[in-house]
């Protein structure tokens, strides 16, 4: 049980009376009669004690009611949404979180992976580590907002976008050749649309992703107009890339896409 001092009690009495869930530097100086230094020390003390959660410098999340025992950690998604709103940025969950959400990977992520246009690196939000992967704003999109029962919204990629990311960002997430199995299974089950997957690849992928997705879709016998839309984005080249990076580049050569089909 954490023992609250006089100033800590005044802080929580004030935030609960005003129904505050966020506090910024400067918010409690006048109401509690604190100097700037006293306020900074109080907020730091509460954050270190695990009673409030620091989102970024000068911004904290506060519990509606301090739980029994005093320890509290902000919900990671709430903290993530708050941070991105504060930064004026956009994000979308990606990687292991998206792959688990869609049921392709049973591994439960220990943290959150998020593409965003403002922050790079790891940050601890509450009890969860968030890995921020900074990308150009134009690489954000093809998303869906998932609302939890408590009303909190998480921004996920669409199913097609998540599959494209698994091919595009294979080295970060170690997803090839598994991603090819996910795509084939979802195409055959009618869970993803080949045209939408191709459009996502053209909009958010790079040349290597277009070539690999094109070769895969061709092997699945998708409509020729879809394949041609991908093919038009490519320049003629005599260079080849492996279908599965990291494996020996040996197998049938797909000349149309410049891909060595080394999956087997």
Image (spheres, rainbow, N blue to C red):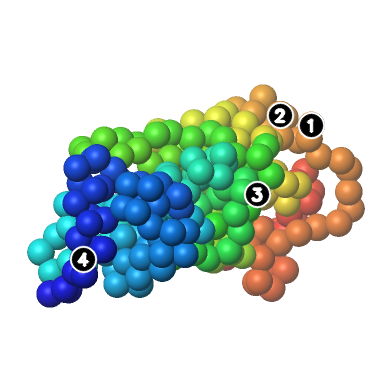
Q: Quadrant of the N terminus?
A: bottom left
Front residue of this view, candidates 112 and 108: 112
Which residue does the numbered mark 2 point to in the structure image? 229
Q: Nearer the viewer, mark 3 or mark 2?
A: 3
Q: Disc 1 marks which residue?
A: 232
Per the image, the residue denoted by label 4 is: 6
Left or right: where does residue 112 sit relative to residue 175? left
User: Percent position (x, y) of residue 74?
Assistant: 30, 56
Q: Observer-nearest residue: 239 or 71? A: 71
Say if mark 3 contacts mark 4, CB within 8 Å. no
Residue, far left: 68
Query: What residue do we see at 41% from left, 64% from top?
Result: 38
Q: Which residue is mark 3?
A: 135
Label 2: which secondary element: helix
Q: Is residue 81 left or right of residue 71?
A: right
**What is the spatial separation of the Cα atoms under label 1 and label 2, in whole angstroms?**
5 Å
């Amino acid at each position: 049980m954490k023992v609250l001092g006089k100033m800590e009690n005044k802080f929580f009495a004030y935030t609960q009376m005003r129904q505050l869930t966020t506090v910024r530097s400067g918010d409690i100086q006048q109401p509690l009669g604190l100097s700037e230094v006293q306020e900074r020390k109080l907020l730091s003390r509460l954050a270190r004690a695990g009673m409030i959660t620091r989102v970024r410098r000068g911004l904290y999340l506060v519990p509606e009611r301090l739980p029994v025992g005093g320890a509290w950690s902000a919900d990671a998604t709430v903290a993530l949404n708050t941070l991105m709103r504060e930064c004026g940025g956009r994000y979308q969950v990606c990687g292991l979180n998206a792959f688990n959400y869609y049921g392709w990977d049973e591994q439960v992520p220990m943290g959150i992976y998020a593409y965003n246009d403002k922050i790079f690196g790891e940050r601890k939000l509450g009890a969860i580590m968030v890995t921020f992967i900074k990308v150009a704003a134009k690489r954000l999109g093809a998303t869906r907002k998932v609302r939890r029962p408590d009303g909190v919204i998480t921004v996920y990629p669409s199913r097609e976008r998540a599959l494209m990311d698994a091919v595009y960002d294979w080295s970060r997430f170690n997803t090839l050749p598994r991603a090819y199995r996910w795509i084939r299974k979802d195409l055959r089950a009618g869970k993803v649309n080949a045209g939408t997957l191709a459009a996502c690849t053209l909009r958010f992928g790079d040349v290597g992703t277009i070539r690999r997705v094109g070769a895969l879709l061709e092997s699945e016998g998708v409509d020729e107009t879809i394949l041609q839309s991908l093919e038009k984005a490519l320049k003629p080249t005599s260079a080849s890339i492996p279908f599965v990076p990291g494996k020996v580049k040996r197998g049938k050569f797909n000349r149309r896409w410049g891909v060595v089909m080394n999956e087997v």
